[in-house]
Amino acid sequence: MAGLAVSASPAPAPASFRPAAAASRFGPCAQVAGPAANFRTRVCGLRCLIAAKLKFRKTLKRHGWQLRRNLEVRANDKVPDWLEATPLTENIMSRDVQLAYDSGGETSNTCPDTLDSSVIEQSSMHHKLNPSETHPPVLKEDPVLFDDPPESAAPLCIAVIGATGELAKNKVFPALFALYYSGFLPQNVGIFGYSRKTLTDEDLRSMIEANLTCRVDHHENCDEKLNEFLKRTYYIDAGYDNKDGMVKLNSKMSQIEGNCAANRIFYLAVPQEALLDVALSLADSAQTMQGWNRIIIEKPFGFTGLSSHRVTQSLLSRFEEEQIYRIDHLLGKDLIENLTVLRFSNLVFEPLWSRTYIRNVQVIFSEETAAEIQGRYFGNYGIIRDIVHSHILQTIALFAMEPPVSLDGEDIRDEKVKVLRSIRQVNLEDVVLGQLKDTSVKVDRYTKSLTPTYFAAAMYIDNSRWDGVPFLIKTGIGLMENRAEIRIQFRHVPGNIYRERFGHDIDLDTNELILRDQPEEAILLKVNNKVPGLGLQLDASELNLLYRDRYNVELPDSYEHLLLDVLDGDSHLFMRSDEVAAAWNVLTPLIHEIDQNRIAPELYEAGGRGPVNAYYLAAKHGIVKIVSPDCTTRGSGGGEMHVTPKFTWQGI
Ligand SMILES: NC(=O)C1=CN([C@@H]2O[C@H](COP(=O)(O)OP(=O)(O)OC[C@H]3O[C@@H](n4cnc5c(N)ncnc54)[C@H](OP(=O)(O)O)[C@@H]3O)[C@@H](O)[C@H]2O)C=CC1
Ligand SMILES: O=C1O[C@H](COP(=O)(O)O)[C@@H](O)[C@H](O)[C@H]1O
């Protein structure tokens, strides 16, 4: 951090960043996001692939992801005419202005020196604030960051509330820097760290710097970018009253923004106990009147259905639904986006997506992580509230939903909530609870708690598409490996003429599709084929797409993905209030039954596969266990036949 001083002028953006990033996304004080902009993100994987195949490679590299993301909006595979024929800036700018829409605030396309009163009035109505609050006090001693000429870009202020916490340090600031580095944040961006500790700007910068790195595959100007980013970072010593703290934050932001129409994002990385105090205080005192305001809230989303409902009601008393982004970073993984991309853009899959062809679905999320760093699980939230309520149920909802009307966030959320409302309440008999045996010094505390660290369950969706199809969930910590995948097992081929060739176990011919995030990103499809040569040997082979072989890029962290979605106003991976409630309706009766009956979880060893009962649960619901590494057998015709399934059942 040597030589870093708070500067009154923003550091100049590099040439490659200015036109594509600042102009396209932020325009001249223009509104930058909205439902229409969602379209950009949805076509992601395929467009990246196609663009990479075209001559764009060098261009993409030079302009960074910002350009790639803009390219992704194209619905065809051709080099866009506008890119070749006219200056990039001009084209992107006009399109973005056209797409401009505001879901959480008002904006203007110009950057007036003074606010006109009609704008103030509109904004105030929208945010339920008093027009008199639009003139924050000015802190004379502080530097002003956003002093670019009006035509440059709409400012964006991002406040990380709980800036000294683990989440902020390890995930949020690094993700913000990665976005800044890659050109996704506007030139006029200000980053504000907020907590109750007495720190200075420099303290915050040093803390952030300790965790910042540049991408291995994209490393130019790293130090320069790091310094630019840190110069735009400020600390707010909020004290112990969030009402005062938010007034301070607002003053600082207003000062940095100047009079330009500005947008604000508030990332609430605070403990659940502090959530409402922080959220309501900021609603009253820290929202901008001249742009949109969005708040990001961390999981878990409540402790029971009732407590969650209360939190939701309080939030909705001050914010519009469209302003609230409930983040679960596990949903920001490519695995999740691929669920819908794969299904809705492939004729070979889309017609098969129902009970007619799918026999069962497994959603697996296991972690090696030891219990020591999962302290908040014990005697507290546990894995059902932390992982199942949001990550697992959202995955099932995205997997099982009807085709949405469009890729717009609200259309997708409309379909997800229908799935959540159709999930049958989970029967305790179809549940396995586990708890990691703990040999650490904290063993007393842990053994007194019945909080599960492992959860398996068979769920059913009572609608016409999924009637009778088991969705087997398996999730836990302290297991043998990190595994995040969705496994789809298909039904048998009716009247399969090769039936006998599979020997005694017809299940061995089960087609299986696996979408995997961990241990490594891949899409795998198990098919049956003939082994070359004389005789009729069948082989269960894999048509594999390993991301590491196909794409030579470092994958962004899921916080980057989701923060960018917030910036874009794309809500499809964030739970709406009705989704939160519907998910609680599935789980609350089960949680009550577990709590009231003090159901003891099955203890399991660290580094193992988890509770043995999970195997029986799978078997009970007809989940195939494909483990036969060597099943040479004889077909009825007497010829030798090898069935060599390479897919072993991952029984975590
Ligand atoms: N850590 C992680 O990886 C994940 C965390 N989460 C969720 O994110 C949230 C934060 O987690 P984490 O960072 O681990 O928690 P920490 O306890 O590490 O940090 C909490 C932060 O909030 C601040 N804070 C605490 N109370 C208040 C208050 N009343 N008003 C204002 N600020 C306050 C603390 O600073 P100070 O005391 O100085 O004010 C600190 O900066 C939690 O809700 C957690 O469930 C979700 C997923 C993953
Ligand atoms: O939200 C959570 O996620 C982490 C895993 O995060 P990742 O970035 O390693 O995928 C998990 O350890 C934690 O239990 C859970 O609350």
Image (tube, rainbow, N blue to C red):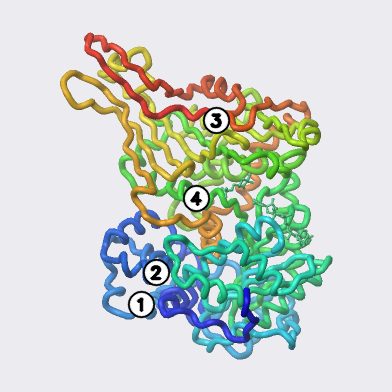
Q: Residue at x 45, y 79 (%)?
A: 14
Secondary element under disc 2, as helix, strand or loop, is helix
Q: CA distance from mark 2 to mark 1?
A: 9 Å
Q: Which residue is mark 3?
A: 652
Residue 254: x %, y % from top left: 67, 80
Mark 4 lies within 8 Å of ligand 2 (Cβ measured): yes
Instruction: Identify the image quadrant of the C terminus.
Output: top right
Q: Which sits earlier in the primary sequence, circle 4 or circle 3?
A: 4
**For mark 2, what is the residue?**
67
Q: Is residue 425 visible?
A: no
Q: Are marks 4 and 2 in contact (CB under 8 Å)?
A: no
User: Residue 437, how many percent across, how many down?
Assistant: 69, 30
| Amino acid type for the residue under numbered disc 4 | Lys
Q: Are marks 2 and 1 in contact (CB under 8 Å)?
A: yes
Check disc 3 and report its element: helix, strand or loop: loop
Amino acid type at mark 1: Leu
The residue carrying mark 1 is 88
The residue depicted at 61 percent of the width and 77 percent of the height is 231
Q: Which mark is residue 333?
A: 4
